[in-house]
Image (cartoon, helix red, strand yellow):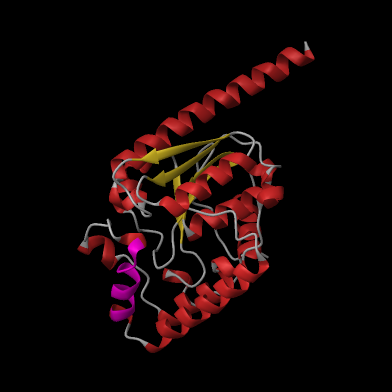
Amino acid sequence: MTLLELEWCVGDPPFVWLHGFTHTAQSGYEFQRSLRATTPLCTIDLPGHGSRADVTSTLTDFADDIALSVGKPFDLGGYSLGGRLALHVAARHPALIRRLIIVSATAGLRDPEERRQRRSSDEALARDCESTPLDVFMRQWLAQPLFASLPHDAAELALRSRDPHGLANSLRTMGTGTQEPLDESLQRCTAPTLIIVGERDEKFRREGERLVSVLPRAELVVVADAGHAVHLEQPQEAFAALLCGLVRGAHDLVRGVLAGADDQA
């Protein structure tokens, strides 16, 4: 039984967008506004966030929920936590993915000891989230070097998730330390894929290059003057890159169909 109700996911194909940690389905409003003008956009609150603050799930289980809920081929994108979740959908249900957009995400830590250490650090962060006033935790979270180039946006900040226990559970059950590396399983996803990263985000530029090396039809776009939260820092540039990727992906799909027809002729 699925956790999700996606009857509103209309269009052919729909585009499902998955948000990052501490965000909600409404986050990235400027980026979303551009998307909604061009494609049928579906957004959902992830476990521990927004309307699903009391929901606990794993990356694999929620990936299955998304696939089951949509139930037909669709376009999929996500940022950071949402990007990792999107990669799990693509790895586990490759036949359902028409086009894939990944913003600042990783295929997972390869070293088991690194994963153990990350689980430990995520648990410490989860305890901080539960014991610290949320506004203080949010300031500390956004003060990380990862977000150094993120502009202050009061409207965007107001859209962040507000439940500390939900956020803590998200770290414990869907954090990077819980993620097995997806390199091998992602090779089964042959959908046209666009990997978007910020020029200043060196770690995730490397992760983007890694994803391009394992996904059969992926390309990497580096957005200038942007860090980790590309779609918040440079929403129009990120949207332009995404739109070009969708158009190229559509052309690839058409070419694939025509090639298949020629093979059967």
**Residue found at x 35% / y 58%:** 27
Q: Residue furthest right?
A: 264
> Dominant secondary structure of the magenta stretch?
helix
Q: Is residue 140 magenta?
A: yes
Q: Is residue 20 magenta?
A: no
Q: Position of residue 139 (x, y in %)?
A: 28, 74
- Relative to the observer, which residue lies in front, 212 or 81? 212
Q: Position of residue 60 (x, y in %)?
A: 65, 62
Left-right relation of 45 to 261: left
Q: Quadrant of the N terminus?
A: bottom right
Q: Position of residue 55 (x, y in %)?
A: 54, 74
Q: Residue furthest top?
A: 265
* Quadrant assignment, res 224: top left
**Residue found at x 27% / y 57%:** 150
* Quadrant assignment, res 22: bottom left
User: Does 4 sit above or below residue 202?
Assistant: below
User: Does 58 sit above or below residue 211?
Assistant: below
Left-right relation of 14 to 130: right
Q: Which residues are magenta?
A: 136-145
Q: Residue furthest bottom?
A: 131
**Residue found at x 41% / y 84%:** 128
Residue 37 in view (yes/no): no
